[in-house]
Amino acid sequence: MSTTLEKPTIPMAGCTIRRAILNATAVRTPFRYWLLHDVLPAWLPEAVRALPFSPTGIGDTFGKRETCNSRRIFFSEANREQFVACGVLADAFQDEATVGLLEDLCRIRLDGGFLRIEYCLDTDGFWLEVHTDIGAKLLTFLIYLSDDPAAENWGTDIMDAAGHVLGRAPGTTNHGLIFAPGSDTWHGFTKRPIIGVRRSLIVNYVKPEWRSRHELAFPHEAVVSGNDS
C-alpha cells in the first residue's frame, strides 16, 4: 500500500475516532443512539471523497440497498491494500482500543466479530424504507462525508415502526451516528432532494457467521476488544 503520508498520521486516525466516541452525545428516545462530530481527522473525509469510485447511476433503490448489490463498494481486503484511505480507516476500526471503547459506550460485546465498512454514494431519487438492521449486525456506525451545503438535511432519519420521522442525524461532513441494532432501532431515509452525491460510510461489526466474506475488511481476523468478558 503506497502512501505519501507520514507514519504518525496513520495511528492518529484511531485517536481522533476514539475522541469523537468519548465526546458523543447520547439520545435516549425513541431508542438509544449517539450523535458525534469531528469523527475523522480532517484529511480523511477528503481522501475518501477522492477515491476513484463513482455513483451507481441508479437513484431509486426501491427502499433497499440490496437492490444494487453488485455495485456496492466495500473497504474490502483488496481495497484497503490498494487505497491508503481504505487501509487507514479499516485499521482504526480494527484497533483493539476502538473496539473496546465502542463496547463500553453501547454496552455490547464486539469481541470475535468482524469489521465491515461500506462506502455509499447516493444520488437523487434514493430512499430507504423504515427498517431495523438485521440480527447479524452487532453495531452500526454511520459517518457522513458530503461537503455539499445541503448535506445538513441528508442524515439518517430516526423513526418509529410506522415510519414516522422522529429525529434526524446531521448529515454534514464528519458527523456520525452510532447505535446497536435491536428490535426497536427503526431508521431509514425518506425521499428528499439530493443535489449532487450523498456520501457516507456504514461501519458495522458483524457476527462470525456473516456469509459475504468479500465485504469484510479483515475476513480472516476477528476483532479483539481487550475488555474482560
Image (tube, rainbow, N blue to C red):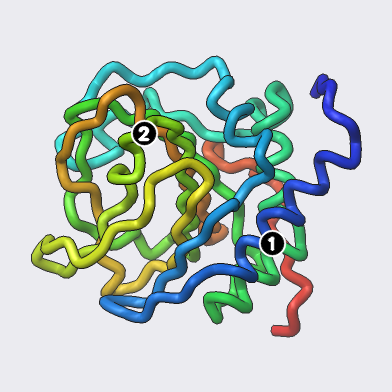
Image spot of residue 166 (x, y percent): 20, 67
1 or 2: mark nearer the eye: 2
Tell me which residue sits at (66%, 55%) in the image: 17
Quick check: can you spot residue 212? no
Image spot of residue 229 (x, y percent): 70, 84
**Front residue (pair 121, 77):** 121
Tell me if 130 is positioned left or right of 215 in this view: left
Point out which mark residue 149 bears. 2
Q: Which residue, as the protein is rendered here, is positioned at the far right?
A: 7
Image spot of residue 93 (x, y percent): 67, 52
Q: How many marks?
A: 2
Tell me which residue sits at (26%, 25%) in the image: 195
The secondary element bearing badge 1 is classed as: helix
Point out which mark residue 18 bears. 1
Quarter of the image holding residue 132?
bottom left
Tell me if 88 is positioned left or right of 135 in this view: right
User: Label 1 to label 2, Cα distance in Å?
Assistant: 27 Å
Quick check: can you spot residue 34? yes
